[in-house]
Amino acid sequence: MQDAQTTTHFGERDVPLGDKQGLVDEVFFKVAARYDLMNDLMSAGVHRLWKDHMVARLAPPRRGRSPYRVLDMAGGTGDIAMRVLDASHGHAEVVVADINPGMLAVGAERAKRWRYPSRATFEAANAEELPFPDKSFDAYTIAFGIRNVPRIGKALEEAHRVLKRGGRLLVLEFSKVDVPVLEKVYDTFSDLVIPRLGGMVTGDEEPYRYLVESIRKFPQPAEFSAMIEEAGFSRVRHTAYSGNIAALHEAWKL
């Protein structure tokens, strides 16, 4: 049983572990309709190229005896799912899972305009307690979502559980800039510009301030890679993007 006194971070604040999910939910309820715009603000629009590269690395097959099943966790708006379906020419089946019903509602509405809308389903799910059987997916993807999970290690263990042997894990997440001049510019942009832009777009700066702080609290690539290995994955690697503003983590269940 989880110790009631255990704390974790919510941005720069320490909060009881049991409270974090509710606080995160409140943030994403506020920004669900503008979530992809939020990522545009936080990455100057480059997140779209990173997502394209993530799906290119996944390389979902375009044919086979059975569908290629992908679980896209924290993918409510469907940004990754749409790319996977297009890349597979509709051969893949994608379950878009998110703990936030507001995000899922946005994605389900968007999916009506996709090329392969019938190949995606939208389901409410907690990354720490997935409602799916063991060994039921060929791939697990999560983009800019895992840093908001209260118990990241538990989410990685669940990803390992639901993947088939030979399955792929791909995690795209913001990181810490490691280019000196760019680091200073990006920090200034994050602290001063992103919350103000977010406030102008949504009328509330606080969700954007939290999201900037959550990036800084997320483990660096080497530490996160160790967490992936601890969850049981093999062949763990990461690719830094744009001076390490973001990183793509890849691993296999062998």
Image: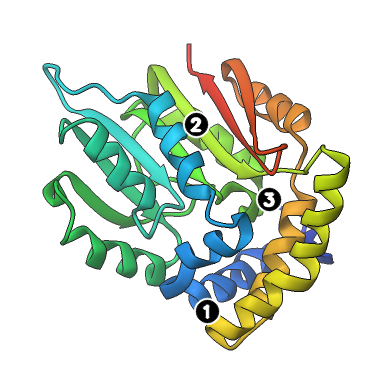
38 to 50, vertically: above or below: below
* Residue at the spot of label 2: 170
Count residues near mark 1 (Cα–Cα under 10 Å), then give few for <14, some for 14-19, many for 20+: some
Give the amino acid at mark 3: Met
Q: In front here: 125 or 197?
A: 197
Q: Position of residue 87 (x, y in %)?
A: 26, 33
Which residue shows up at 59% across the image and 47% down it?
146
- Compare marks 2 and 3 and give the one earlier in the sequence: 3
* Residue at the spot of label 3: 1
Cα distance between the residues tagged 1 and 2 = 27 Å
Secondary-structure class at tag 3 = loop
Cα distance between the residues tagged 2 and 3 = 30 Å
Give the amino acid at mark 1: Lys
Secondary-structure class at tag 2 = strand
Horizontal side of residue 153 vs 111, given as left or right = right
Secondary-structure class at tag 1 = helix
Cα distance between the residues tagged 3 and 1 = 31 Å
